[in-house]
Amino acid sequence: MTGAQYVRPTTRAQLILSESIIGIALIGAGYWGPNLLRNFQQNGDFDVRYLCDLDEARAKKVLGGYSTIPVSVSVDAVLSDPAVRAVAVATPPDTHLPVVAAALKAGKHVLVEKPLAANLQDGRELVRLAESSGLILMVDHTFCYTPVVRRLRSLVRDGELGDFRYVDSVRVSLGLVRPDVDVLWDLAPHDIAIVDSVCPGYARPVAVAAHGADPLGLGRACMAYLSLRLSNGGMAHAHVSWLSPTKIRTVTVGGAKRTAIWNDLDPQQRLAVHDQGIEIQDAQQPRPLYRTGDTVYHALPEKEALRSVTEEFARAIRSGLPALTDGRSGLRVLATLEAARQSMEADGAFVPLEFDKQMQAVTP
Ligand SMILES: NC(=O)c1ccc[n+]([C@@H]2O[C@H](COP(=O)([O-])OP(=O)(O)OC[C@H]3O[C@@H](n4cnc5c(N)ncnc54)[C@H](O)[C@@H]3O)[C@@H](O)[C@H]2O)c1
């Protein structure tokens, strides 16, 4: 690590704390919690001290008959154990405010599932609590930790794609219809976090429009289209749906020179970079010129994103420096979702989006 990234512990007590294994409790043993459990168990930086869920039988079933990890139904009991230095929260979004706030007030570092909270105001309170007490608050925006998003980010930043133009994401399948949130709040946090991670500084979202439909009559959108207007005149778009019998997971990132296409369902050719496109050489006489070049398939390591999530959480706790997807990035995602909600209420009109001081990335 370079000196700029690493804050060297100054006292012996700090050194022991930074080197020691981190006791962690997992809260929420439903659909996603077991994935976190497996990855924290496989990461030697952590010692899983509890699996906590209101549904005791569910938590016991997740652990199986041979585990020595205790099950608890009480968040308060888990948080009162000093051996627990960190918690990972995989409960429904409307519980994130009380559960995460209690953990931060008890002095624990927190990894919370996306979205950070059920609304922007709750998210702000959690970021304020974490920052005022010097604790790590990290959001599991899982896709930001995939090798492919990391590669896309460097392709954009290194100028490989040329001037940044657009992101176009499709995330549809016959999905798990959630009882608590609409499809936008369920699936689009992934796309918004990917846009947040990949777009360069000169192409930030400045306005949001969203359209949704509820053909099942559930009272919340089951399919939705999200458009972000970017500050450089480009755009980012996401199509999310629980209703598609065909599963599609593609993200296209277009630049002036090349276009990258990520097909997450094709492990052989997951990321293709096409040296093909349309150019206008004379702005006075705009005539499209078609350029056809090679397509390069990138070799990427096969690594589970959640493994990298746990590694990033450990790094942030040990160094005291914010995680890649810290609370502030969680707030940017929430601000975008709230603007999308307002847009849907306004029949899809564009709603301005501004990231205020509390949402700006911390530069160490
Ligand atoms: N990162 C991803 O790709 C991804 C994927 C799926 C879900 N998620 C997120 O994970 C979170 C959980 O989703 P899920 O699908 O696992 O939900 P779920 O309903 O399947 O499970 C939630 C569990 O939390 C427990 N619970 C609720 N309130 C609790 C409390 N106060 N204390 C202790 N336990 C409590 C419930 O009993 C349940 O077992 C959501 O925020 C969701 O958006 C993330």
Image (spheres, rainbow, N blue to C red):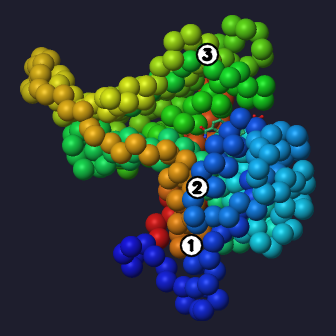
**Mark 1 crowd level (few <14, some 14–19, many ≥20, 10 Å Cα):** many
Asked if disc 3 and disc 1 are in contact, CB closer than 8 Å, the reply is no
| Residue type marked 1 | Arg
Residue 121, percent from left and from top: 73, 48
Q: Is any atom of residue 110 visible in this view?
A: yes
Front-most of 271 and 290? 271
Q: CA distance from mark 1 to mark 2?
A: 18 Å
What residue is disc 2 on? Answer: 42
What residue is disc 1 on? Answer: 318
Residue 308, percent from left and from top: 50, 53
Q: Secondary structure at mark 2?
A: helix
Q: Is residue 70 left or right of residue 334?
A: right
| Residue type marked 2 | Gln
Q: Is residue 342 left or right of residue 9?
A: right
Front-most of 283 and 56? 56
Q: CA distance from mark 3 to mark 1?
A: 40 Å
**Mark 2 crowd level (few <14, some 14–19, many ≥20, 10 Å Cα):** some
**Mark 3 crowd level (few <14, some 14–19, many ≥20, 10 Å Cα):** few
The residue shown at (58%, 66%) is 45
Residue 227, percent from left and from top: 49, 26
Q: CA distance from mark 2 to mark 3?
A: 31 Å
Q: Secondary structure at mark 1?
A: helix
| Residue type marked 3 | Leu
- Displayed-image quarter of ligand 1: top right
User: Disc 3 or 1, which lies upstream in sequence?
Assistant: 3
Task: Please determine whether, in this image, residue 29 is positioned above or below residue 250.
Answer: below
Between disc 2 and disc 3, the foreground one is 2
Task: Please determine whether, in this image, residue 157 is positioned above or below residue 311.
Answer: above
Point out which mark residue 174 bears. Answer: 3
